[in-house]
Image (spheres, helix red, strand yellow):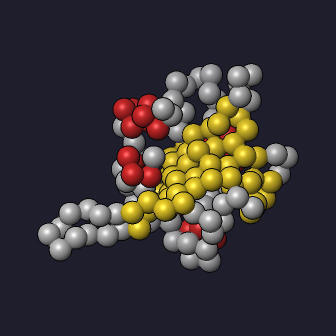
Amino acid sequence: MTKGLGSLVTGSSLVDRGEQYFIAGAHRIHRRSIDGEDESEIILENKWFGCSSVSTPGGLCENTLELDTAAEEHPIFEVLDLSVDERFKNLPVVNGDVAVYRYYAGTPITTNHKTNIGSLFIFDDKVRRSMSQRHKACTLL
């Protein structure tokens, strides 16, 4: 997903009553060859995945979990520029304490009983345009 969507970071998390647990992720290292070819490398992220958690109130994934999966075929919570969004501009992954991400898109991980239990998400360090319906559909595959 990191390569297909050209994102900097891809991750997944599970949520319980107030805590979000990061369970997997990948990070893109941008590289260009001498002749301009994209030689970016995708690496598994061990920095904050697998054993870390954050409280959920006010977070990006909390908003992703609030999406109604019954009302929309491919629900995506998307923030095109985190640095100007009053809800998120002071989060550590936006303000530089942990990272300086600008773009976020997430979709709920939903059980067969239509309960959202986590999220699959991407971050980028650049502001982006909104995802097309085609990209939204591909994100869930």
User: What is the x, y in percent for residue 18?
Assistant: 83, 51
Looking at the image, can residue 102 be seen?
no
Q: Is residue 123 left or right of residue 30?
A: right
For the residue pair 77 and 54, the one nearer the viewer reads as: 54
The residue shown at (39%, 63%) is 41
Give the number of marks.
Answer: 0
For the residue pair 127 and 4, the one nearer the viewer reads as: 4
Q: In the displayed structure, would residue 107 be above or below residue 54?
A: above
The residue shown at (57%, 40%) is 107
The residue shown at (36%, 68%) is 30
Q: Is residue 92 left or right of residue 57?
A: left
Looking at the image, can residue 16 be seen?
yes
Q: Is residue 90 left or right of residue 4?
A: right
For the residue pair 60 and 114, the one nearer the viewer reads as: 114
User: What is the x, y in percent for residue 96?
Assistant: 56, 76
For the residue pair 113 and 68, the one nearer the viewer reads as: 113
User: What is the x, y in percent for residue 40?
Assistant: 34, 63
Query: Residue 34 falls in which quadrant of the image?
Result: bottom left
Q: In the displayed structure, would residue 125 be above or below residue 133?
A: below
User: What is the x, y in percent for residue 123?
Assistant: 50, 57
The residue shown at (51%, 30%) is 74
Q: Residue furthest right?
A: 17
